């Protein structure tokens, strides 16, 4: 049995993201597959998806929609989900076999190396493999020390990489960022192409898959943390609120 889990809470993503992820996973995994969605609202989710209630979690003052809630998949409330588990964010597109994610470095906690912090031992938590019983202490530690932890670490993936260390990073080519890799050499005249060797394309931030498919999205209101960038980006976003690239025509072929 190969177990894949995702988590959906709040209103940012609708049930279609779960349903399409379920379909992609089943197309790209061999053998028996268990696909689990941990959620606070299962309305519209396909009946082939195993639904589990969002576990209770002491998250402190960071708010209901915080990414720190992702740690709740380590909860003892999910103790019947065991063995190696592949976690996938909802905003990904699977383009090749997922079998290697279960064969790679057995018994290790495996995660993407964050593309913007290469060489700093920081993971990107859109795709990681774990064993729940080994990771339950990570959740317990966060719940007990959340104020100190959120002061020390900017986000859940930085904390998770440190708490699960030593981690093993996936081969670089397996997980590619649409924003950092595919858009790098694309634009108005060149379509963003799936890189050789890619198995999962991650759509963190903007654009999301349907926006990439049409090549158009609204620039985010949130400005980066670098002070020198803020005035320029605010002016740019005000003058050019819509960002456009050549549509990624392959999205409709794979994201279904």
Image (cartoon, rainbow, N blue to C red):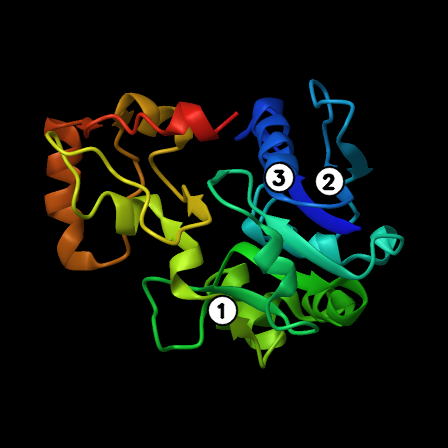
Q: Are marks 2 and 3 in contact (CB under 8 Å)?
A: yes
Q: For the residues marked 2 and 3, what is the alpha-carbon distance in whole angstroms? A: 8 Å
Q: Residue furthest top?
A: 44
| In-image side of 119 versus 51 (left or right) | left
> Disc 2 designates what residue?
35
Of the image marks 3 and 1, the number of the one nearer the N terminus:
3
Classify mark 3: helix, strand or loop: helix
Q: Residue at x 36, y 49 (%)?
A: 177
To which quarter of the image does residue 183 belong? top left
Q: Give the number of the mark in front: 1 or 2.
A: 2
Between 174 and 82, which is closer to the camera in this rendering?
A: 174
- Is residue 58 visible in the rendered image? The answer is no
Residue 211 placed where, x, y %? 34, 26
Q: Are marks 1 and 2 in contact (CB under 8 Å)?
A: no
Question: Badge 1 local density, few (<14 within 10 Å), some, or many (20+)?
Answer: few
> Disc 1 designates what residue?
153
Q: Residue furthest right?
A: 80
> Disc 3 designates what residue?
25
Residue 21 placed where, x, y %? 59, 34
Q: Is residue 216 above or below residue 157?
A: above
């Amino acid at each position: 049995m190969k177990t894949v889990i995702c988590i959906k809470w709040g209103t940012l993503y609708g049930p279609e993201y779960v349903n399409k992820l379920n379909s992609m996973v089943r197309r790209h995994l061999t053998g028996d597959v268990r696909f689990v969605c941990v959620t606070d609202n299962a309305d519209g989710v396909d009946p082939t998806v195993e639904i589990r209630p969002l576990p209770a979690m002491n998250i402190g003052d960071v708010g209901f929609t915080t990414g720190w809630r992702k740690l709740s998949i380590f909860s003892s409330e999910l103790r019947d989900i065991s063995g190696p588990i592949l976690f996938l964010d909802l905003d990904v597109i699977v383009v090749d076999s997922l079998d290697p994610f279960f064969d790679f470095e057995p018994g290790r906690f495996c995660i993407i190396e964050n593309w913007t912090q290469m060489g700093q031992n920081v993971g990107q938590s859109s795709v990681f493999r774990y064993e729940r019983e080994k990771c339950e202490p990570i959740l317990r530690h966060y719940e007990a020390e959340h104020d100190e932890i959120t002061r020390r670490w900017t986000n859940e993936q930085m904390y998770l990489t440190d708490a699960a260390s030593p981690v093993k990073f996936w081969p670089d080519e397996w997980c590619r960022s649409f924003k950092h890799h595919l858009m790098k050499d694309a634009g108005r005249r060149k379509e963003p192409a799936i890189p050789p060797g890619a198995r999962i394309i991650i759509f963190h931030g903007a654009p999301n898959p349907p926006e990439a498919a049409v090549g158009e999205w609204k620039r985010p209101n949130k400005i980066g943390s670098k002070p020198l960038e803020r005035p320029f980006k605010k002016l740019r976003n005000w003058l050019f609120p819509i960002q456009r690239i050549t549509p990624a025509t392959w999205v409709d072929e794979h994201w279904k």
